[in-house]
Image (cartoon, rainbow, N blue to C red):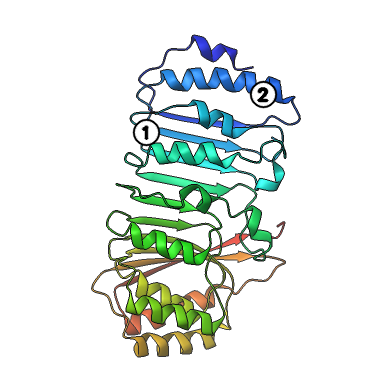
Amino acid sequence: MLDTLDALQLPGLASFSFTFHTGFIEAHIIELNLRHLIIFLRKTVGLKELAIRVDETSCNLNLGFLFMHLGTLEYLEKLSLMMPPLDRFDASHPDILFPIISFIRGHRDKLLDITLKSNAMFVFGTPTDSEVHCWPWRLLDAINFESLVRLDVGAVPFNWLVEFLRSHRRTLHHLTLSADVFPFLPDRLLSLDRELSDSPLGLSRIREVSLTLRSLTPRLLVYILKHFPAAQHLAISYLTTPPPSTFYEQLRKMLIEEGVATSLERTFEFTTVRIRGIVEGPELLQFIYQALQETIGGIVCQGDFVDDEDE
């Protein structure tokens, strides 16, 4: 029970993180505890960072109730929200997102750092699977943040992402995409490339990029390099790639053809996600490094392997 929070007086508290693990506790008991949490948070007038995580057992939790009654946190700069896919919540709360949207909208002039993603990680699923995971963009849609510097989101529609980045190009410096949002059909990718060349994203201010990809291809890597020209640190987690030697030849050729160049020293971090024992090995990293050095220069490459065989 959270009734003990009522007596706490922590007006100088700057950061608060809370995980909901309600299981199948009755809804009215959950709401009672939410009221205690709301009272506590509204007393922490100096709060700058708020992190809420909802585990997958919290079926009866109405998270919208919490955000509906939080009011305005005057100094809030960083918001992190991780929750299950929408189909895991009780159907009695179909409007769970609306109060959260209202809360975010009310803090759009203060927020510098936003993290929104599903904690049941959707990374390599199908487009149909993504519908219940793709809620982060619904919270941010049509909101223009005045000072947003860092964005970390899970599954979002690619075209929506393009528009969001375009509208926040003056302030955004750090971008993390923890689910695969890139289209991989070659004709689609080429079409988007032409569109963005005619109407640039304006991503010259983004210095750090972290991406999760289903498949890392030479064309996609060149595409990323072109449209994040100022990214000094690029971290990519991926599941599959073409054979290393083929990757090298194609990457080197495309880098030259596209005229990708940089005057910056860049750090590239490549992580292979190993599933069912399939892993490309360190040879790929060597080939990528060689191609980048021969055509761009100023590259520092790091490699790692993550064992996700249980997924």
Where the N terminus falls, by quadrant?
Answer: top right
Image: 237 above or below 28: below
Q: Dot 2: within a 10 Å radius of its alpha carbon, few (fewer than 14), some, or many (20 or more) residues?
A: some
The quadrant of the image that shows the C terminus is: bottom right
Quadrant of the image occupied by residue 104: top left
The single residue placed furthest to the left in the displayed view is 263
Residue on which the image places disc 2 = 30
Secondary-structure class at tag 1: loop
| Of the pair 86 and 186, the residue shown nearer to us | 86
Q: Label 2 amino acid?
A: Ile
Residue at figure coordinates x 41%, y 72% from the top left: 224
Position of residue 167 in the picture relative to residue 94 (left or right): left
User: Image quarter for residue 61?
Assistant: top right
Q: Residue at x 57, y 80 (%)?
A: 185
Residue 117 point in image, percent of width and height? 55, 49
Quick one: SS at disc 2?
Answer: helix
Instruction: Estimate the x, y position of residue 12 in percent, counting from the top left.
Output: 35, 20
Could you tell whether 185 is left or right of 261 in the image?
Answer: right
Residue 270 visible in the current orientation: no
Residue 279 image label: none
The image shows residue 84 at horizontal and vertical percentages of 64, 45
Identify which residue is drawn at 65% across, 53% down. 132
Q: Earlier in the sequence, mark 2 or mark 1?
A: 2
Identify the residue under disc 1. 76
Residue 150 visible from this viewpoint: yes
